Structure formats: structure tokens, C-alpha cells
Amino acid sequence: MTAHHDSGPSGWVHRLAPAPADAPGAPASSEPTLTEATARLGEGPVAWAVLVGTELARVITREVPELGGGPAPFETLRMGTEAAVLRSLLLLADPAADRTVPEESLLGDREFARRRVGLDKVLRGIRVAHAALAGALMAACRERAAPADRAEEFLRISELLFGFMDEFSSRMTTEYLTEHDRWLASGAAAREETVRAILDGQPVREDTARELLAYRLEGRHLALVAWCESPAAGDLQRAAADLLHLRGCSSALILPTGRTTLWAWGDPQAPHPAEAPPGATYPEGFGFAFGSVRHGLTGFRQSHEDAQHAARVMRLNPGGTGPVVDYPDVELPALLSADLPALRRFTGDELGALAADSPHAEQLRRTLRLYLRNERSLMAAAAQLHVARNTVTYRVKRAQELLGHDLTARLPEVMAALEAARVLGPAVLLKADEAHEA
């Protein structure tokens, strides 16, 4: 391991650093990878790689959405792109450096195989990353390298990235196919194929499926979609099983769909699942989206669809719904948000300035919503808000002024918009420059 330096034509690599206004965020790479890179490149280039790695992950998920899928899969992808940027910088600083594809990138590749993302999508993601990384390195070289060295450095960047990405694609293909074959040879493959057949509405023999899945398909079902921010699949599976048990399920089917995501089903004994005990806590960074309780093979599929909708609502407003959400509690916003841009326009049209994303507007929306849900009872709303009756009177009057139209004439629409704003928050609310509070 050698100390970093900034002399010579490639010295610009050691002078890399994020712009003062750009916060790189927390690194996604492993501690050994970061320690080695910092020792050989310096803190500035490593911080630059973290920032560029995050941007590469965003570009990839925008161009190839199948490689995303939520916060946890994005973090896995970011870990791989960040490691690739670091390895590229190490090679630019020292052509004799190790050219091996980083293990962090292979972890994401294996997850793509387990999630059944097509190899063509994976290779397209690599091409997108190649183009974006080349652009970032060329721009950085243009800014930091001496004018006399730029032409040679541009050529070196191009040749190095072409060779590295060619080897990268080859190794990722091999690893993908190996993981895919390993998955096919496991019992998990048969279980997942059976579950996906049911979800796709394909005909299946219930007795054969029941034996393979070790789970009854003819009774009630409560579906769960769960995820975590870091690779802790074992903990996630235990947490999902424990939570289904707390909801009144005597048995459960747990199906991991990636390193940080899973699908699950339980068999609740009652038509409405039990609530978790008061004060129940959940691991940090975990999310649990439940469907509705439904019956039979069709209900197995429908409850899962409900859970997917609930998960989408949670991801639209991270932190605004809590770690556990039941589909019946967010059903209306889930249905309305199938077309999010249209819902945002609807919310703005119905609520006017009351749709502003501000604490004051939120207070007025909550007061108006409780007032309407309590059949316009000032006393009932005041009791739920723990404020005086006159306070509710003032807030309701102010909220109706901000609506900009007659509340009575469009009561169902206004209540739907208030519910969407409550659950989805900033995803459907207006920014300060879009809404003005008088």
C-alpha cells in the first residue's frame, strides 16, 4: 500500500474532491475498501467517488428502472457503483492496481439474478454507468489536470474505462449466470416459481402447491411486503415471521426476493388481523406493508397486490406513515396515487393554498379533516385535537378561506384530497412557490 501523491500527469486524480455545496452522504462500500482507497488516493477522491457513485445509481435506475425497486435495492446498487468508481480512480492513479471486479458490485449482480432481473437489463445498466462515469471523469480531468496533460489523460481515461468495463461486463455475466444456476438448483427456485404462478393467475394444483410451500392456500391470507435498508435478510425474515404471529397468524410463508426484500403470507384466524401490542418496536430501517385479509387462492394474490400498493404509499412519503402500514388504512390514497401527477393536480385544485407543504397548512388541513369526519362537530374535533372549541372554529374558517371555493359543493372531493395529503404528504403537496398562504 502506497501513500497518495498529486504530482505527475495523473496527479489530478489525487486532487479530486466534491464541490463545497455537494454533500456526498454516507459511503456504501465496506470499511476495508474505504480504508485502502483512502490510504492510496486520499479523503477528497474517496468523497468524490461516493458522490459520483450515488449519481451513477440514480442515472441507472432512471434509465433501467428494473434495477431499482425501492430504497434497499437502490442502496445495494449504489454500493456497486461506488466500488466501481473507486476501482477506476485507483487504476487511473496506478495502472498496476488490481483490476478485479469489486465484491460489492458482484453482490448486487447476484441480487439481480435472484430478483429475476434479465441479464440484458444488467448489461444495459453497465453501459449506462460506463457512459456516465466517463463523462464525470472527463469533466473532472478538464477542471483539475494541467492543460498540457489533458489530451493524453482523456485518451488514458477512455482506454482504461473501456478495458475495465469490458472485463467488468464479462465477470458480471459469469457471476449472474452462476447465481441463476445456483438459484434454479435450490428448493427456493421451485417455491418462488409456484408463488409467482399463483400471483400471475396461472392454474396450479392446490394440493401440490400446498405440499411444496408448506402453507395452506384454501384459508384466509394476510400478505406482507417487507424490506430493510441494509443487508440483514435473516433479521428481516425473523421480524416478518414475528410480526405475522403478533397479527394472529399461526403459520407463515416467507419468500425472500432479494438481499433486503421479502414477500410473506400468514393465515389469520379472524377476518380482521389483530393489532400489534402497544409499544411494539421495530428494527431501524425496516418497513412492513400489509395487505387486506382475503380468502382462498384468489385472496392469496389479491392480498399481495394490496400489500404492494401499501408499500408504494410508504415509499412515496418515507417516514410519514411509520414502519408498519395496513392497506385498509391507506386504501383511498393508494388508489388515487396510481397516477401521482394527476393526484397532485387534483389535490392542488381542491385544496388551493391549503395544499401548501408547510406546518401551518398541515395544521389547518388536520383540523378541517377531523371537523368533517366528525360530521362538522366542533366539540368532537376539539377533543381529538386537544384544543379549545374556539380554536377549531378559527382554524376551520381559515381553512375554508384558503380552499378558494365552496366546501359544500365539492365535499367528497375535498375530503379525498385531505386524505391524500395526510397520507402522502410532500408527494402531493405544493411547494412554497406554487401555493401562497394569505
Image (spheres, rainbow, N blue to C red):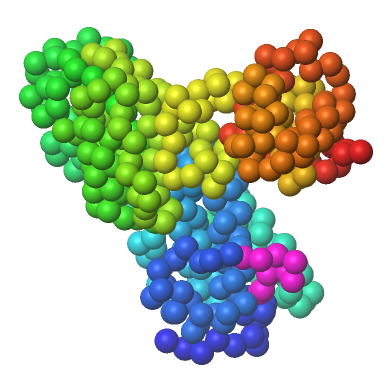
Quadrant in the rendering for residue 291: top left
> Is 395 in front, or is 50?
395
Q: In this view, does 170 lie to the left or right of 163?
A: left
Left or right side of 191 for 116 = right
Query: Can you say whether 337 is above or below 355 in the image?
Result: above
Q: Quadrant of the C terminus?
A: top right
Left or right position of 41 against 282:
right
As drawn, 327 above or below 45: above
Residue at image coords 51%, 89%: 3
Q: Main secondary structure of the magenta part?
A: loop
Q: Is residue 422 magenta?
A: no
Quadrant in which the N terminus is drawn: bottom left
Where residue 409 sits in the image (x, y, percent)? 79, 10
> Which residue lies at the image location 35% right of the left edge and 18% below the top edge?
302
Relative to 255, 151 lies left or right: right
Residue 130: x %, y % from top left: 55, 52
Q: Range of the magenta residues?
A: 16-24
- 437 above or below 408? below
Q: Give percent across and percent down for residue 208.
A: 9, 18
Q: Is residue 301 visible?
A: no
Residue 375 location, x and y as percent?
Answer: 65, 19
Going 32% across and 44% down the picture, which residue do you hit? 277
